[in-house]
Amino acid sequence: MRDKIEEALNQVRPTLQKDGGDVVLVDVTDEGIVKVQLTGACKGCSMSQQTIKQGIEKFLKSEVPEVKSVESV
């Protein structure tokens, strides 16, 4: 499942990188919780939680149905 998540994140990265940020996959639990860290401009952005929940989580769930949620660490 980790490989599928990395592949999906690679599709999201260009959008984040265009704004000076990026996302790093930190962990995937057996329960389907994906832990990520935003970096660069995304790290301190006031919209970072929305980016994670409405952007990254929504996309990952559509690409990898085993994903239950995405959390920032």
Image: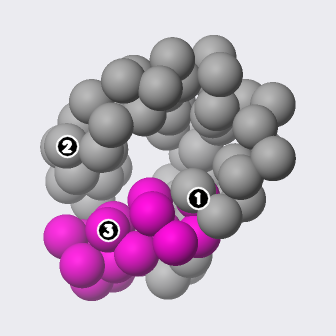
**Among the 4 quarters of the image, the one containing residue 6:** top left
Q: Residue at x 73, y 30 (%)?
A: 43
Say what amino acid the circle numbered 1 marks: Ile
Q: CA distance from mark 1 to mark 2?
A: 14 Å
Q: Which residues are magenta?
A: 52-67
* Main secondary structure of the magenta stretch: helix
| Real-space Cα separation, disc 1 to disc 3, in angstroms | 10 Å
Q: Which residue is mark 2?
A: 11
Query: Badges 2 and 3: C-beta atoms under 8 Å apart?
Result: yes
Q: Earlier in the sequence, mark 1 or mark 3?
A: 1
Residue for badge 1: 52
Q: Nearer the viewer, residue 72 or 18?
A: 18
Quadrant assignment for the C terminus: top right
Q: Residue at x 65, y 22 (%)?
A: 41
Would residue 60 be found to the left or right of residue 47 on screen?
Answer: left
Label 2: how many Cα within 10 Å (few below 14, some 14–19, many 20+): few
Residue topped by disc 3:
59
Is-magenta flag for residue 53? Answer: yes
Element type where label 3 sits in the image: helix
Q: Earlier in the sequence, mark 1 or mark 2?
A: 2
